[in-house]
Image: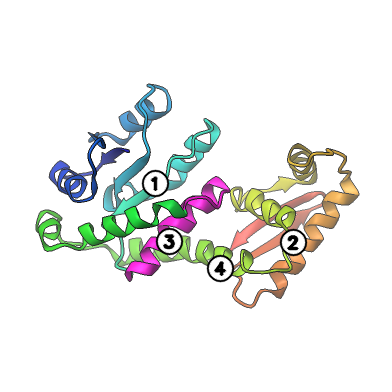
Amino acid sequence: MCFICSGRNRKVFEMLYEMISKVGDKFVFYEDLLLLLDMVVFGGVKSDLLLLDYELHWKSIDFIYNLFESNKLAIPVIMIGGPDLPVDAQVGKWISENEFRYDTQNLHYLIPLFRKIFSAEKSDELKKLMPDSKKTSAASNEFRLRERPLRNLMESFRKNADMPPSIYNLLIFLYKRHGKEVSIDEILSYLNQNHSSGMFCRKSAYSYIARLRKCIKSSPFCDIELMRTRTGYYKLFLR
């Protein structure tokens, strides 16, 4: 595997790589995130996993995923040095976030590697190289607000037997545009592009929206709301 890393302290990622790598793996480090993204997206640098410094890069995560998606890349990304979670919760978060962002369910092969990364990150050797975690309360609160809806979506909707894949895919489409108005024509275009028959009409689109809203309403742990903002326009809100 090729591990591409970026952060404040190269030694942290070098030691992390030494603790998790196998024969034949490759380590690449960039101090500049934009240079990293330019080389991966446009420079032909192959990457199997991005390891990024949470404190330095957490605000860029949406931009990174959107850039990869727009260039038809699906490179898993994990943040090192974020808020403490138990091992199962942390590994599950890394898996579910990447699966959700890339609309896939085939990343469970990474669980053993993610467990190794978790163990390495918590080791005394690595902690000595990492700066004290003095996150501001604002940053911590924003992280929780950003992560809570994603976890609830994954846990509530993927486990909801009443939600067919087509409705779940519509949820993903709207979630990636949350906070922005989406027209019924955009939704109709999405449904036709992602269905073999491509024969959806506006009435079908409204029916799908109604079914999705019903699923959202029936979920007791849901932290999202799909509202009609004006005639023919909808917006997904994160509470």
Q: Secondary structure at mark 4?
A: helix
Looking at marks 1 and 2 on the same chain, the residue that comes earlier in the sequence is marked by 1
Q: Secondary structure at mark 1?
A: strand
Which mark is nearer the camera, 2 or 3?
3
Q: Dot 3, how many residues are within 10 Å of its Cα: few (below 14), some (14-19), or many (20+)?
A: some
Q: What residue did someone put label 3 on?
A: 93
Q: CA distance from mark 1 to mark 3?
A: 11 Å
Residue at left offset 37%, top offset 27%:
38
Q: Secondary structure at mark 2?
A: helix
Q: Secondary structure at mark 3?
A: helix
Q: Is residue 180 above or below residue 221?
A: above
Residue 146 lies within the magenta run: no
Span shown in magenta: 86-107
Q: Dot 2, how many residues are within 10 Å of its Cα: few (below 14), some (14-19), or many (20+)?
A: many
Residue 10 in the figure: left or right of residue 230: left
- Relative depth, front residue between 67 and 25: 25
Looking at marks 3 and 4 on the same chain, the residue that comes earlier in the sequence is marked by 3
Q: What residue did someone put label 1 on?
A: 77
Residue at left offset 21%, top offset 57%:
120
Q: Amino acid at mark 4?
A: Glu
Q: What residue did someone put label 4 on?
A: 155
Q: Is residue 236 above or below residue 7?
A: below
- Counting from the top left corner in percent of width and height, residue 174 is at 66, 51
Which mark is nearer the camera, 2 or 4?
4
Q: Which mark is residue 212?
A: 2
